[in-house]
Image (cartoon, rainbow, N blue to C red):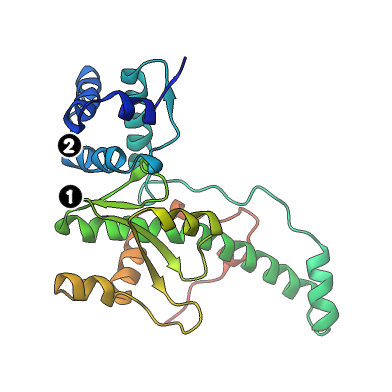
């Protein structure tokens, strides 16, 4: 019968024995047991309702599967990832709807609007990944570790002091299931921008840690750096006409 995370938690007589199972499994694969692993797994043990939904034939197999998922996610973070363009075709009726209201638009205009929209969707798809990696870099100094690969459900960052943090780009980007889970769990929530006012909430971290390093300017610089170093982080369709614009003479 497959073993779950909760099974390991329930059969471990102590937190130390629970962590030792993972430490031994990592050692068998020649992988170090890092402070990040210790912090995140401790959060799983202390908050079993947030344990990842992994299964394995033995505790060791499950531990190795957890490590693989964590490592795969980290190694495929947005600064290294090759994103895929939309896998669906555009619905022609959208052009008809737009043209019925804005009758002076030409077929070329409508084609440009279509691809601009699809490009914007691709950008929105990686917003959360960019924010996650930016925070992973900035928060590390303060004892926070990113829960790569959903290594804790509904939690994006775990702190060495046991704190849990869920982050969102916008105040209106959270679904009902992720908000409900916080009712019975000690998870703090932070979002980058208030969708109603457009105000940024970087002061949450700056005030907490007495710094100015968290800002929209620094985040924008980080995004520029990532996309310059890894242009394929943003998927652009081969047929997208916006990529063929002539370079500015300025």
Circle on res. 231: none
Indicate the quadrant where residue 40 lies. top left
The foreground one among 139 and 229 is 139
Q: Position of residue 113 (x, y in %)?
A: 68, 71
Spatial CA distance of label 2 from label 1 is 12 Å
Indicate the quadrant where residue 43 lies. top left
Mark 2, residue position: 34
Residue 55 shown left or right of residue 40 in the figure: right
Residue 64 seen from this side: yes
Residue 16 shown left or right of residue 76 in the figure: left
The foreground one among 98 and 46 is 46
Q: Is residue 35 above or below residue 226?
A: above
Dot 2 crowding, Cα within 10 Å, few <14, some 14–19, many 20+: few
Count every numbered label the image shows and give the total.
Answer: 2
**Quarter of the C terminus within the rendering:** bottom left
Q: Residue at x 85, y 79 (%)?
A: 100
Q: Position of residue 77 (x, y in %)?
A: 37, 47
Residue 227 seen from this side: no
The foreground one among 198 and 59 is 59
Residue 122 shown left or right of residue 42 in the figure: right
Dot 1 crowding, Cα within 10 Å, few <14, some 14–19, many 20+: some
Q: Position of residue 213 (x, y in %)?
A: 20, 72
The numbered mark, 2 or 1, whose residue comes first in the sequence reads: 2
Residue 109 shown left or right of residue 134 in the figure: right
Indicate the quadrant where residue 53 lies. top left
Q: Residue at x 19, y 71 (%)?
A: 208
Q: Residue at x 78, y 80 (%)?
A: 105
Circle on res. 160: 1
Please tell me whether mark 2 sits on a helix, a strand or a loop. loop
Q: Is residue 183 above or below residue 26?
A: below
Q: Position of residue 166 (x, y in %)?
A: 37, 58
Foreground label between 2 and 1: 1
């Amino acid at each position: 019968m497959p073993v779950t995370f909760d099974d390991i938690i329930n059969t471990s007589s102590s937190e130390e024995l629970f962590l030792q199972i993972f430490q031994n499994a990592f050692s068998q694969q020649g992988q170090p047991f890092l402070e990040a692993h210790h912090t995140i797994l401790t959060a799983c043990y202390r908050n079993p309702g947030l344990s990842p939904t992994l299964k394995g034939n033995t505790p060791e197999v499950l531990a190795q599967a957890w490590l693989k998922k964590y490592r795969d996610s980290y190694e495929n973070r947005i600064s290294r990832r090759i994103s895929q363009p939309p896998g669906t075709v555009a619905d022609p009726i959208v052009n008809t709807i737009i043209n019925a209201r804005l009758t002076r638009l030409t077929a070329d205009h409508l084609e440009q609007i279509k691809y601009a929209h699809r490009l914007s969707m691709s950008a929105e798809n990686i917003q959360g990944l960019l924010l996650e990696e930016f925070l992973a870099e900035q928060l590390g100094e303060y004892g926070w570790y990113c829960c790569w690969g959903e290594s804790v459900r509904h939690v994006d960052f775990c702190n060495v002091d046991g704190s849990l943090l869920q982050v969102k780009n916008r105040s209106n980007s959270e679904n009902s299931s992720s908000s409900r889970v916080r009712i019975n769990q000690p998870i703090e929530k932070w979002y980058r921008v208030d969708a109603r006012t457009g105000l940024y909430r970087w002061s949450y971290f700056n005030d907490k840690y007495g710094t100015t390093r968290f800002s929209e300017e620094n985040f924008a610089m980080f995004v520029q750096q990532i996309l310059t170093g890894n242009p394929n982080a943003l998927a652009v369709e081969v047929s997208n006409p916006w990529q063929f614009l002539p370079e500015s003479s300025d």
